[in-house]
Image (tube, coloured by chain):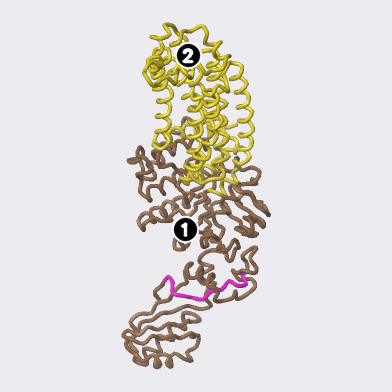
Chain colours: A yellow, B brown
Amino acid sequence: MNLRAIRAIVVKDMTVLRHAKAVLIPLIVVPLVLLLVLPALAAFAPALANVPGAGNLTDLLESMPEVMQVRLAGYDQDQKMVVLLLTYLFAPLYLILPLMVASVIAADTFAGERERRTLEALLYTPTSDLELLLGKLLAGFLPAMAVAWGGFVVYAIVANVAGWPTMGQVFFPTWMWLVLALWVAPAVAAVGLGATVIVSSKVSTFQEAYQIGAAVVLPIVLLVVGQAAGVVVLSTAFVAALGAVFWLVAVVLLRYGARSFRRGELMARA
Amino acid sequence: MTPERVIETRGLTRRFGAVTAVDALDLTVERGEVVGLLGHNGAGKTTTVRLLNGVLAPSAGSALVLGLDPAADGVALRRRCGVSTETPSVDDRLTGRQGLTFFAEVYGVAPARVVARVDELLAAFDLSAAADQRVGTYSKGMRQRLTLARALLHEPELLFLDEPSAGLDPVAAREVDERIARLREAGTTVLLCTHNLAQAQALCDRVVVLERGLVVASGAPSALAADLGAGLAVRALLGAAESHDVRSLLTGTEGVEGIDVVAGDPCELRFEARDQAAIAASVRTLVRAGVEVFAVERQVPSLEDVYFALHRGERRSREPGGWAAEASGSTAAAAEASGSAAAGGEERT
């Protein structure tokens, strides 16, 4: 395995990304909203709940299934609201980060490379198909994990600081969130990569690859909706199992994607 | 295979569905040779380069490049080959230096040598001043020089140049030609894919003409050109004269045929002479008859003449052992290959 070549591909793709506005803007804006704005706003949830006509949050709290009510039993009404939002309802949204970062970068490095017509020169290099694929996958996976884990730390700080007036203690992260960040987030990033590799082999442009690849966000949207509707209740065990499912899907997608990443086929389409 | 033979293909074929891009190609390239692959768009030149580098698998036939089978030993082979592609080699968003450094790492240039080698090539290709500018700001000529520099980073034994002058202005194209000439002088083996016939004639030891994946001619440019015409094409400018007078004067002159006269002042005369003596005899005849002779030019067929003659299909190969028939794997096409001396390079007699 030519690790030097793989590292060079990763470094090159990351250098290219730093100058790609179309790629960078969503990579900056979405984490800012999900990791800073949302948890900071959550601090105002108890106050918002007391605004006339804004009783939805209280209603939401009361509509949660019994298992959730039990988990929140040790908190007062305001604390319940903060914990419900920051620990449970926002949890699936966090998964959007690794998925989106991995998908956007993979779309740029796979389909974008073909669109810019720089793929041919790369295919003439003395690298195997596997080395090329690994280099490209890592170029998407490493930033995705950097954003996911860095974002997890930022989220934890913002959640505790913003929630301090209500909670009066450090309440985050929970075991569920640790499993989410360390086990599920990499799996979700891998799913995003696998899906985008497959899509990129069928399309010609970055935009096409990104837009079609974005369909993998649907399971996460279902989690958000399911939890808000009280159908799904996240727990450490549930999240661990969810991670296993995502890893399974990721392995299937990556294996299929690797089959489509053949030099000859790529060159024929370059 | 002798150690000096760096490319040898036998019946190399590549099909894309119903289209045969390369059809039973037999090609040999010796070490130190510059061989031109000529042909229209879609003739199979780029596909041949891809097959020879192991980035496309052949549908049939075999190839040995630097003693390696491209289909089986592609990685090892590509480490020893350099390819200058027609498509951009370095992302617009990288600087020239970043692009070359990336390829130096991937091609396995010794880590301690990378910086020096990149600087060396940037200087050699007059890109030092723009080394830290984004490639997106480069002119087409600069990009082409960068592509050539990239192909040479790892000092390859065999260089494939795919349309190295495509889209360049005459000055930039000449610069590229000069670089290739220097590589040739340095003994680098080069397979040059080009539409540029003057470039092929100037730089190549041999050329192979492809048409729809078939070889229709191969040989040294001069040999192909010499084989094109049986005699010497001559063009003369004469004082005002009636065309039928000039024609009748030369008709019957031994070794002269194909007389064509365009009346005017000056009057233009073209004919084909069997040898130089026939040219001298013609001039003597005209002068004795009082016709003013301003200029006499012997026209040497160029590679361009050969190329267009092949594609026009005007004339059949004259003998079984002729150059057209020698073209391997192309008997049918060679039979159709033909040519006639057309206006080309001029050599004053």
Crowd tier of the residue under label 1, counting other residues whose Cα lies within 10 Å: few below 14, some 14–19, many 20 or above: many
Q: Residue at x 43, y 15 (%)?
A: A159
Question: Residue A103: which numbered mark, if any?
Answer: none
> Which residue is at 43% across, 79% downward?
B234
Looking at the image, residue B156 sits to the left or right of residue A46; the answer is right
Residue B228 x/y as whole percent:
53, 73
At label 1, the amino acid type is Leu
Give SS at disc 1.
helix
Is A190 placed above or below B319 here? above
Comparing labels 2 and 1, the label whose residue is closer to the camera? 2
Residue placed most toward the observer, A256 or B330: A256
Which element is circle 2 on? helix
Distance, label 2 to label 1, CA atoms, is 76 Å
The N terminus of chain A is located in which quarter?
A: top right
Q: Is residue A74 magenta?
A: no
Who's the residue at 50% across and 88% down the image?
B254
Q: Which residue is mark 1?
A: B203
Instruction: Tell me which amino acid carries mark 2.
Output: Val
The rendered magenta stretch, by its main secondary structure, is classed as loop
* Percent x, y of residue B110: 50, 32
Residue at x 44% of width, y 85% of height: B260
Can I make out residue B186 in this image?
Answer: yes
Q: Quadrant of residue A246?
A: top right
Residue furthest front in the image = A53
Q: Which residue is mark 2?
A: A83
Question: Which portion, as a residue range, is magenta?
Answer: B334-345
Q: Position of residue B275 (x, y in %)?
A: 49, 80
